[in-house]
Image (spheres, rainbow, N blue to C red):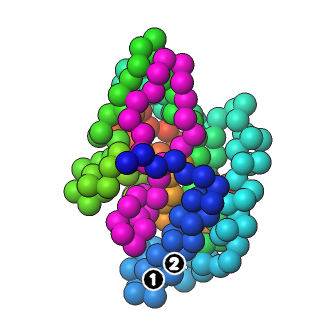
């Protein structure tokens, strides 16, 4: 089953993320223990509407480029902190090679629950070296990773827009290392 995220679907994902974040903070499992972390608010859906303009503004100069196998290149165009307590990383995955490339299943990570949901970028992490914490891709209430899903291959020269959502590091953290299995890692700036 192939799933493409439309604007409406992304708003739904943002709403689920905010609900999941609220449930985690109520249960005391927020991970940061930070009373200074922002609480979920109704601005999450408003923020998702503004994402294309932020991405367009940075499209000519990506925050980072990470190289993967078989000519795959991920250009990270933005990493935006939201008042809902998460960071959304946007980018473009491109096949820079001369042949069709099957996107490796390893990008989904090694967690059975995520692997069972199909191909995704569920294996990605953000590492806050200053705070000595690693942040994993968020999941919805059904265990699906909050990333682009439903992809399998890219033709030569083809690219696709991708997104990944993570719990937000503390507000004092303005940079984190983005890691994705089989790809090089890169330090990226977190805005917002």
Region of the chain picked out in magenta, as a range: 137-162
Instruction: Name the side, left or right, on which 104 lies relative to 31.
Output: left
Q: CA distance from mark 1 to mark 2?
A: 6 Å
> Going 40% across and 72% down the picture, which residue do you hit?
141
Task: Kindly give the residue lying farthest to the bottom in the view shown.
Answer: 26
Residue where numbered disc 2 is placed: 19
User: Is residue 147 shown in magenta?
Assistant: yes
Q: Secondary structure at mark 1?
A: helix
Q: Residues within 10 Å of mark 2 (few under 14, many from 20)?
A: some
Instruction: Name the side, left or right, on which 115 lies relative to 86.
Output: left
> What percent of the width, then of the height, locates residue 103?
37, 32
User: Is residue 96 shown in magenta?
Assistant: no
> What percent of the width, then of the height, locates residue 81?
63, 61
Q: Residues within 10 Å of mark 1 (few under 14, many from 20)?
A: few
> What percent of the width, then of the height, locates residue 27?
40, 87
Residue 9 appears in the picture as rendered: yes
């Amino acid at each position: 089953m192939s799933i493409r995220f439309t604007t409406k679907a992304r708003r739904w994902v943002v709403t689920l993320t905010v609900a999941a974040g609220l449930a985690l903070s109520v249960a005391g499992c927020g991970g940061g223990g930070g009373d200074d972390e922002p609480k979920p608010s109704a601005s999450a859906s408003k923020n998702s509407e503004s994402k294309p303009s932020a991405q367009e503004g940075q499209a000519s100069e990506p925050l980072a480029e990470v190289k993967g196998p078989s000519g795959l290149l991920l250009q990270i165009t933005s990493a935006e902190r939201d008042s809902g307590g998460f960071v959304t990383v946007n980018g473009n995955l491109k096949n820079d090679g001369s042949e069709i490339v099957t996107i490796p299943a390893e990008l989904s990570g090694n967690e059975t629950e995520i692997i069972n949901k199909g191909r995704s970028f569920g294996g990605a992490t953000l590492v806050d070296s200053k705070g000595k914490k690693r942040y994993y891709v968020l999941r919805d209430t059904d265990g699906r990773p909050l990333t682009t899903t439903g992809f399998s291959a890219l033709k030569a020269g083809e690219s696709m827009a991708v997104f990944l959502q993570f719990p937000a590091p503390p507000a004092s953290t303005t940079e984190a290392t983005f890691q994705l299995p089989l790809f090089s890692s890169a330090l990226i700036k977190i805005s917002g």
